[in-house]
Amino acid sequence: MTARILVADGVATTRITLKVRLAAACYDVVTAASAAQILDLLQQDLPDLIVLGGSLPDACAIDICRRLTSEPRSAGIPVLMLARTDRRLAALQAGAAAALDPEITDQMLLARVRGILRDADLQTTAELGLAEAPAVFDAARVPQIVLVADSAGRALRWRQLLAGRLAARYDIRGADEALVGVRSGAAADVYIISADLEARGDGLRLLSELRSRQGSRDAGFVVTIAPEREEMAAIALDLGAGDVLPETMFDPAGIETAAMAIGLQLSRKSRCDLRREEVKRHLVWAHTDPLTGLYNRRYALPKLSEIARDAIIDGRDFSVIAVDLDHFKTINDRHGHAAGDAVLTDVAQRLKAALGAEGFAARIGGEEFLLALPAAGAEKVQRIAERVRLAIQDLPIELPRLSGGGSTRVTASIGVVAVAAGSHDNWPDELARRTLERADRALMAAKASGRNRIVVSQADIAA
């Protein structure tokens, strides 16, 4: 879907020029000539990005930026401000995602717009749970900033100037050391990289490499550009840099702005980490049976299809065990539902212990459980099924005081299916469905023949 961009500036020629430049890149552009028009448009439809000029007739651009980034309706919309160098720090302090010179080139403007929209998409992806989960974010942890400069002296200067402005741990590394750190699990929260290291463009190659690695792809990246190398800024943004700063900003006169820009990268990283962790928790809850802690049916059936797919592709065995507790209803009738819950919880732990690392266990019904073993053949699955049966029957289960205390014993009927490599050519979903049906029939046969026993399905699965 084409991104929608709101361009706001009090000067008509500026608005028209920006609209033409952005529309040429196939963005859907709407314009506003005043702060009042901005607010009216936001009531109608929310854009994906606001490009805010410095000339509004009815409000200070910095003030309207601060309002846009603080009000609930518009706070999630990134603001790109066009501001002179002496106003850039104020723009960032007001909440702008970036502040650019009004005379910026088309290449740099579009690269910055793409980068801001990409970051917004990444945050949305994190909220939906579609991105890979990073390491757990610890709010009490001091963030780590890795400095990769073209000389040790420059890196030391960066650290000296930034240390008093951003509370972080600063590590000075070479390009190879930065990559080794990722492999060893010591990725940084933010990397500050010179565009040119030992050779021209080495820093951009390092940026690309770090962005491609799982341990560091979610970090923030700031690339510093020498004045004579401004053409590299757009390339750096398109390679995934969150911000590009001229090397002159790391002088005392510009360090406050640089520190603010780096701080924004730290904040973005923290927000994304927290959102991913929240989504990860929600996904776990959605896939977990709240009583037993095992996976639930919603997780188990698609996962069984994945196991079937891998078995077809790799030509390997897989097995399924269906477990149903015998006479479970009598426990609820005699001792109450609290006792029944205690039995289910205890049995779930026994199933997990008996299964070990061989596969996964799920509760798919009231007292029904499913065990799937991705790489187990007939002999192995029968041994595990017997281990499960004995684990359930051999030890009494303590009942809660609420139900009168004491203990009870339970047994289980078990149906087993072993699917041999090469014995099937079904589609994965069909193979999983038919395997589960066979396990259910074997389970019913175990119950019909006396309970507390194992029945192995003997029928082959036809194509």
Image: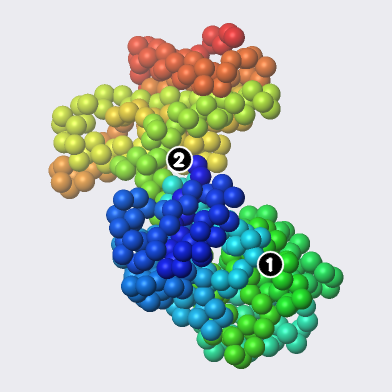
**What residue is disc 2 on?**
352
Q: Mark 1 points at which residue?
A: 233
Residue at the image position 76 percent from the left and 62 percent from the top: 205
What colour-coding does the image apply? rainbow
Between the C-alphas of marks 2 and 1, the distance is 54 Å
Q: What element carries label 1?
A: helix
Displayed quadrant of residue 64: bottom left
Which amino acid type corresponds to the residue marked 2 in the rendered image? Lys
- In percent of the image, x 21 and y 46: which residue is there? 400
Q: Upstream in the sequence, badge 2 or badge 1?
A: 1
Whole-percent x, y for residue 252 in the image? 61, 91
Q: Is 309 rendered above or below residue 133?
A: above
Type of amino acid under label 1: Ala
Q: Specify whether 318 is left or right of 348.
A: right
- Residue extending furthest front? 13
416 vs 130: above or below:
above
